[in-house]
């Protein structure tokens, strides 16, 4: 009994300490995308980032990331193109005001490198994506950086096109404070 009690206390202490991962407050975010159209790379941004980031390097199983951006904030530095992208042919911002990303699993790769499996929802379509990212802490500030690629037609964004690529590259950079 004397040997079991310390072991039980140790397990209980770990459960209490690691069971809850605290949310991090987003202080800055940047979401950029790149797509080829007529052989020219078109760059754009999305804003209105909201997130509930609960990330603990020592407790990945208890960590979770839920984020969204507002579709009506799409900006390609071309008003006519922006209006077209907001239409029902593309993002249909009136019907689908947000794009959401929810973690399913997060794995440590090496050093500050991680890979997450996420459910990405654009319009009414949800697909699993793999998002490699880095996580760097400096004092009370942390930065998440990641890049991934999606097929726009998998999410019902635009139709099939001979001039516009199906491949969309997305760069994320989110700074949080603890």
Image (cartoon, rainbow, N blue to C red):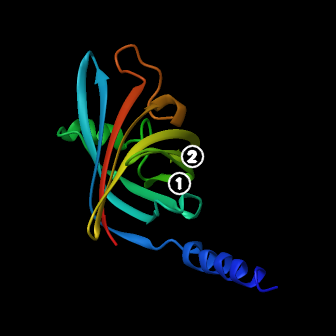
Q: Residue at x 22, y 37 (%)?
A: 80
Label 2 or label 1, whichever comes before in sequence order: 1
Q: Quadrant of residue 146?
A: top left
- Is residue 120 or residue 5 the one in the foreground? 5
State the residue lying farthest toward the front. Answer: 2
Position of 25 relative to 171 (above/below)? below
Mark 2 sits on what residue? 124
Residue 50 position (above or below residue 161):
below
Judge whether residue 11 can be spotted in this image. yes
Instruction: Say which quarter of the image contains residue 143.
Output: bottom left
Q: Position of residue 60 (x, y in %)?
A: 54, 58
Q: Position of residue 50 (x, y in %)?
A: 38, 63
What residue is rendered at 59% in x and 73% in y? 19
The x, y position of residue 28, in whole percent, is: 25, 61
- Residues at discs 2 and 1 in contact (Cβ within 8 Å): no
- Residue at which label 1 appears: 102
Pointer 1 local density, CA inside 10 Å: few below 14, some 14–19, many at least 20: many
């Amino acid at each position: 009994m004397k040997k079991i009690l310390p072991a039980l206390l140790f397990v209980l202490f770990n459960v209490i300490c690691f069971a809850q991962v605290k949310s991090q407050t987003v202080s800055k975010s940047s979401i950029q995308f790149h797509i080829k159209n007529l052989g020219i790379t078109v760059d754009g941004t999305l804003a209105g980032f909201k997130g509930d980031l609960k990330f603990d390097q020592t407790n990945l199983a208890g960590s979770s990331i839920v984020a969204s951006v507002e579709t009506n904030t799409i900006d390609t530095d071309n008003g006519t193109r922006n209006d077209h992208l907001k239409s029902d042919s593309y993002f249909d911002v009136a019907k689908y005001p947000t794009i959401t990303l929810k973690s399913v699993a997060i794995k440590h790769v090496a050093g500050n490198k991680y890979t997450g499996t996420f459910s990405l929802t654009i319009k009414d379509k949800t697909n699993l994506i793999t998002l490699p990212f880095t996580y760097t802490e400096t004092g009370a500030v942390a930065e998440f950086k990641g890049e991934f690629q999606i097929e726009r037609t998998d999410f019902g964004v635009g139709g099939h096109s001979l001039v516009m690529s199906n491949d969309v590259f997305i760069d994320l950079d989110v700074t949080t404070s603890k």
